[in-house]
Image (cartoon, rainbow, N blue to C red):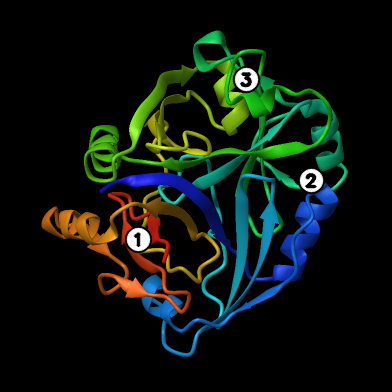
Amino acid sequence: MAVTQLLRVSLTVSDLGEACAFFRDALGLEAGPEQALGDPAWNALLGLAEGTTARGADISFGDETLKLVAFDPPGAAYPSPRASNDQWFEHIALATGDIVPMWEKLERASPETITEGAPVLLPPNTGSVTAFKFRDPEGHPLELLSFPKGVGDPRWQKGGAGIRGYDHTAISVTDLKRSVAFYTDLLGLHIAGQSLNQGPEQDLLDGLEGCEVDVVALAPSETPTPHLELLHYRRPKGALLSADVAASDAASVRQVYGVDDLTSLVAKLEAADVAFVSPGIVTLKSGAKAAAIRDPDRHMIVLLEPS
């Protein structure tokens, strides 16, 4: 009755071709063939109107998949102005063996940057990782990460250029204690690490001033990587949501988790008054069962039990 692994991250885009081209040209990642996502049950699952259609493409890294999805009709564009501490913020952290060549390749695409200047080496209490945050052409935040020896998943230890996969997805939360309780007590994730990130390096990384941010890594029970990270900005405080982000809006990023007993988990979530996007459990064309919920900060989560 718990999530077992982060199966994939699903990212809404308005222009699927442009999004695939950015990942290919700026990051060296090839998207798979375009797919027509024709299962009407997905509309009920994601809280979208009947008749909404979607096209998708998978960016696969071996063990991890990032799914890009474009909906018709499309939703709202990514909000502007935008910052790393916005309540709707969710980024995907891409692990690379050697960050400098990747950053130089990325810079040639002239992306919107979050980090000021070059990749930032973070202090030892944060794992001494080197990181750089940026946005794709629609505004979605992404991060390049390079891990020192002995830190992170062993897959990230190999040197050389290229992206190995994604290490985690990170979300902004407004109440750390509440969010930790939600993900651990209700979904069964466990705390895999935590730190307080502050100082000039964090300011440069986030493009903010006077950062104090709690970072809590939460891992699924069976497959610890990729995982979820909670980002709680003690200061500066970020912009708050004025309305829920719909699945068709460009700011929508969905954590898709595998579940071992969806029926029991949904009953537990309903008893805890968790907000549901779907009308309970939805049966997909494939025979799999799924439910969609929102966490305390309204980030969307899809729970999937294979057929």
Which residue is nearer to you in this view: 50 or 104? 50
Q: Residue 246: image x %, image y %? A: 43, 69
Which one is in front in this view, the residue at disc 2 or the one at disc 1?
2
> Which residue is found at the position 37% from the left and 56% from the top?
241
Amino acid carrying label 2: it is: Leu
Quarter holding the C terminus is: bottom left
C-alpha span from label 2 to label 1: 33 Å
- Upstream in the sequence, badge 3 or badge 2? 2
Q: Residue 272: image x %, image y %? A: 14, 53
What residue does disc 1 label? 242
C-alpha span from label 3 to label 1: 34 Å
What residue does disc 3 label? 129
Q: Residue 288: image x %, image y %? A: 41, 69
Which residue is nearer to you in this view: 228 or 38? 38
Answer with left or right where residue 102 lies relative to residue 8: right
CA neighbours of label 1 inside 10 A, class few (<14), some (14 to 19), many (20+): few
- Upstream in the sequence, badge 2 or badge 1? 2
